Image: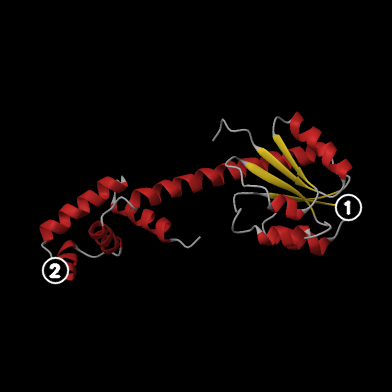
Amino acid sequence: MNDVMPVVFVVDDDISVRESLELLIRFAGWQPRLFESAQAFLDEPRPHAPSCLVLDINLPDLNGLDLQRSIATARHTLPIIFITGYGDIPLTVRALKAGAVEFLTKPFNDEVLLEAMTEALQGSRAALAEEQQLDSLRQTYRTLTPREQEIMASVVRGRLNKLIAADLNISEITVKAHRGKVMRKMKARSLAELVKMAALITDPD
């Protein structure tokens, strides 16, 4: 992930803003992707790279706040930096409460924007790494047999081996054997670590 060039998306209907930001982004060593509308951005495939979005509040189709809301779940690893032609405290509060990392009023200082983009890309890189780790954990979990998944579910609930054996109508020795396989396959070094893994796997977010 560290070797992948970060991507900075810009959504602004003002071509002069897009052009100036393209130069700034390239100067910083990142890849710019420019859009004049929210819909054009939504049609763009999600890159598997650290990325952030520089987003104008006022757009001709879907406004910036609506776009922020529409991608909140699908693109949760994409930090948003809002830019606007006028200061509006209620809008700023709404954007920041919804997770925006910065809200800048045009004309903004290039250094301030560069700093905001740098922090946003660092946050995106960390979120992608966490997402990748979770995907790997779920793939590992799927290698467990149905019986091993049953045993794991009982173990993380704090059930003792003898109680699990009674629940499943199998011997305690068999429970211990399955439990050992679960620990090895999941690469869990302790029960506490297995419990944390289980919580991540079953977390709806």
- Residue plotted at (26% across, 49% down): 183
Residue 48 spot, x, y in % from top left? 57, 42
Disc tally is 2
- Residue plotted at (51% across, 43% down): 129
Residue 101 visible from this viewpoint? no
Residue linked to disc 2: 169
175 is higher (above) or lower (below) than 29: below
Dividing the image into 4 quarters, which one contains the N terminus? Answer: top right
Residue 24 spot, x, y in % from top left? 79, 34
Within the image, what quadrant is residue 74 found in?
Answer: bottom right
- Residue plotted at (86% across, 43% down): 17
Q: Tell which residue pokes out farthest to the bottom in this image.
A: 167
Q: Earlier in the sequence, mark 2 or mark 1?
A: 1
186 is higher (above) or lower (below) than 97: above
- Front residue of 186/93: it is 186
Q: State the mark number for residue 85.
A: 1
Q: As shown in the figure, which amino acid type bears the numbered disc 1?
A: Gly
Q: Indicate the secondary structure of the residue bearing disc 1.
A: loop
Distance Cα–Cα, label 2 vs label 1:
69 Å
**Badge 2 density bin: few <14, some 14–19, many ≥20, Cα 10 Å:** few
Q: Indicate the secondary structure of the residue bearing disc 2.
A: loop
Q: As shown in the figure, which amino acid type bears the numbered disc 2?
A: Asn
Within the image, what quadrant is residue 156 found in?
Answer: bottom left
Q: Are marks 2 and 1 in contact (CB under 8 Å)?
A: no
Residue 60 spot, x, y in % from top left? 84, 58
Residue 117 visible from this viewpoint? yes
Residue 35 spot, x, y in % from top left? 77, 46
- Front residue of 154/141: it is 141
**Badge 1 density bin: few <14, some 14–19, many ≥20, Cα 10 Å:** few
> 24 left or right of 175?
right
